[in-house]
Amino acid sequence: MIEIFGSEIKSLEILSLLYDKKLVVRQGFYGHELSAVESFCKKENLHFVISVFKVRPIEKGYSNKGMLSKEGMSFVYISKDELLANKAAYFEIKEDHFNLGILLGYPRCCCSFFEKRFPYRSKLDNNYDDDVLAASPKKRYPFQMNIFKRSEDCSLLSHFPCSLGCKESLVIADAYLEVLRLQDVSRARAFESGLRCKMMGKTFF
């Protein structure tokens, strides 16, 4: 699956969709990647909607921020439910970040957290790590909540939690980890090992 979707994190999201832990997945792909993704979706009876716009990442490699471009990547909305895939695409166009987040399975508290900070963060680097840290005063948090290794393709969460202590986000991370364990125990162990560390002034245990 990684050879189709291009990363561990994206593959985990698709697995979570197949195991009914997510209703909709939103991911970005370049034109040459879309045919393989679309073929996979047809094989798995998943509905596949492509955004009407394209985005080019500001920085090479992992980047949270992009700009509209004729030659950039398209967002793809994938779901077992055709209506939900189309609704996600619609909310994206309308810049309705709250309802898009809800469709993607994020906790309401985290959707509100993102929506509140988007106006100023989107004009900077679109990276909400500092906001998450500011809302997380404790020094120790469960490894499942470590979102700071995304650039290393290691994260159980595909959203910015309202804090590292968000209980609803922890439930989601645990569910995704269980899916990964069912699919590939060695990969699950690799995720856990990678996320158990000290970084950003926190200990993830």
Image (cartoon, rainbow, N blue to C red):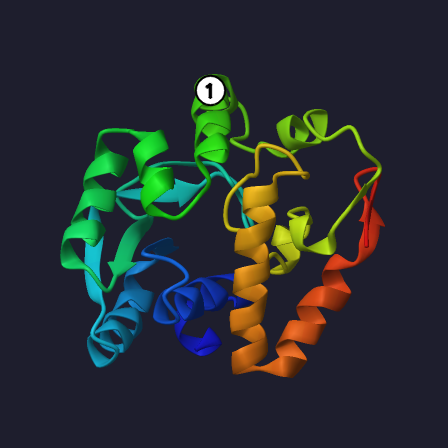
Res 186 → quadrant? bottom right
Residue in view at x 64 percent, y 34 percent: 163
Q: Which residue occupies the foreground of this view, 146 or 56?
A: 146
Residue in view at x 64 percent, y 73 percent: 188
Looking at the picture, how far across and down is residue 21, in whole percent?
41, 62
Residue in view at x 66 percent, y 48 percent: 145
Q: Quadrant of the N terminus?
A: bottom left
Q: Left of 93 or right of it: where is 109?
A: right
Res 205 → quadrant? bottom right
Identified by mark 1, the residue type is: Lys
Q: Left of 135 or right of it: where is 173?
A: left
Looking at the picture, how far across and down is residue 94, in whole percent?
22, 29
Q: Which residue occupies the foreground of this view, 88 or 69?
A: 88
Q: Left of 40 or right of it: where is 10?
A: right
- Neighbor class of circle 1 (other Cα within 10 Å; few <14, some 14-19, many 20+) is few
Res 136 → quadrant? top right
Looking at the picture, how far across and down is residue 135, in whole percent?
68, 26
The reply to whether residue 123 is visible in this rendering is: yes
The reply to whether residue 6 is visible in this rendering is: no
Q: Is residue 102 above or below residue 32?
A: above
Q: Which residue is mark 1?
A: 116
Q: Secondary structure at mark 1?
A: helix
